[in-house]
Image (cartoon, rainbow, N blue to C red):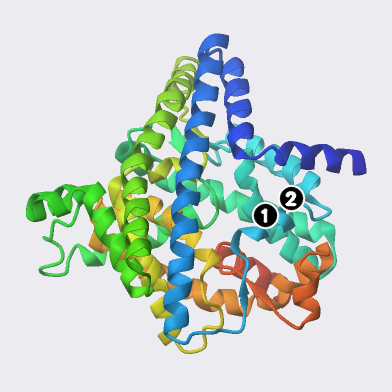
Amino acid sequence: MVVLQNAVGWFLGLGSTVIVPIVLILLGLIFRVGLAKSIRGGVTVGVGLAGLFLIVDLIVAALQPAVAALATRMGLELALVDVNWADAGIAWGWPGVAALVFSIIIVNLIMVYFRLTKTLWTDVWSYWHGSALAGFVWALTGSVTWGVVGGVAYLILGSLMSDMTAKKYQEFNEMPGIGVPCGTTVQASIFAMPVVWVLDRIPGLKDWDASPEGIRKRFGLIGEPVILGLVLGMLIGIAAGYNVQGILGLGMQVATMLLVLPRMVSIISEGLVPITMSIVEFMRERFQDREIFVAVDCAVLLGHPAVMAASVIMFPLAILMAAVLPGVQMLPIASLAVIPFWAGAIVPYTRGNVIKTVIVLALYSIPFMYLATLTADVHTAAFANMGQFTAEIDAGLQLASWDMGGDPIGFVILNIFKALGFSL
């Protein structure tokens, strides 16, 4: 079992930019896409993902210090330590990760076979959300088996939500055949559905064309994505108290992101669409009444200009909300990185309206702020079991995050186990 655990850990340690191309190439061969077409498509997707993550990392690395400086100027200092995607250390390191990966593959294949889901969960990298929750359950119950059960339940729900959202993602992003079942990203779409329905019925707001195209028509040069990015970056730099050099530098970094990121997503689409379309055609020819969605990384949703425009506006807004909401104990600095992925799932429902996207993001972030606080004990216990962040834990600090610590479905699953009598 240790050998299997190490083998799975080694493979998952390759990261999404390697795992995704490998899986796509194998899918291409299984569904008879052709060797050359499969390799070309898989490698192209990997290159696009690598470029996209470089751009996202660039902007997050640039904006996090600015937002932290803004928080310092406001005198904010909350109790919990935001670790956000460090939760991947739990996901890929807890003792049941190998059993979880093999269990969800088998369960997903059974569900697809019996038509319980249309989503073929091929995005192995995104299993990490369910695996991190499994690590939390393990810390709560002391049982690897219960951890696997909790993680598989979470991932099953992800595939069902993918079925509900796939068509919208496909049409808006022009990527036929895809599904995005991962974590809090797909949950953002489910949350957006009723909220956008309400927003579309508010006089004034419902008719306000705040799409990038509408902003460009109304404001001319300032409405251009690259200039809008420059202005937004400079405004955040001013709010953070930067000097002129820092203000201009942050403006250019945000402008770069808004211009380059959609082009990275177009590269992903260039490699992905031929493979997914071939799989769709394969299923249509052999099973005329079957429809399959190929699960892909949530990064493919980041290409529309409204995604990053809304995200940049939301970054400082999230800090202000954490400052004024009573009972919130975590200042979301590291967790800001998840906001663009939420925006990517919301924008298809707001039809690219930046203002509506920001409103949905703000409302969606509220439960995360409180749930991250409520799960800090089990979150910290999971890291303690892993032997991670020992210095911070020994000093009496508690760890939290938005992406898994604040995950609404994860919170429900954890509380089901608590209702069954499990506790720390």
Q: Are marks 1 and 2 in contact (CB under 8 Å)?
A: yes
Q: Is residue 200 above or below residue 291?
A: below
Looking at the rendered structure, which numbered label has been put on residue 317?
none
Which of 392/420 is in front? 392
- Quadrant placement of the C terminus: bottom right
According to the picture, the residue beneath numbered tag 1 turns out to be: 88
According to the picture, the residue beneath numbered tag 2 turns out to be: 92
Tell me if I can see residue 421 in this picture: no
In percent of width and height, residue 351 lies at: 25, 50
Tell me if I can see residue 318 in this picture: yes
For disc 2, the neighbor class at 10 Å (few under 14, some 14 to 19, many from 20) is: many
Which of 86/199 is in front? 86
Dividing the picture into quadrants, the one containing residue 102 is: top right
Name the secondary structure under disc 1: helix
- Quadrant placement of the N terminus: top right
Dividing the picture into quadrants, the one containing residue 313 is: bottom left
Name the secondary structure under disc 2: loop
Which of 342/252 is in front? 252
Mark 2: amino acid = Trp
Outermost residue toward the right in this view:
2
Q: Is residue 38 above or below residue 150?
A: above
Residue located 58% across and 35% down the image:
17
For disc 1, the neighbor class at 10 Å (few under 14, some 14 to 19, many from 20) is: some
In percent of width and height, residue 404 lies at: 60, 63
Q: Is residue 3 left or right of residue 72?
A: right
Outermost residue toward the bottom in this view:
326
Mark 1: amino acid = Ala
Q: Is residue 311 left or right of residue 414?
A: left
Q: Is residue 406 left or right of residue 255?
A: right
In percent of width and height, residue 405 lies at: 61, 68
Residue located 43% across and 68% down the image:
66
Total number of numbered discs in the rendering: 2
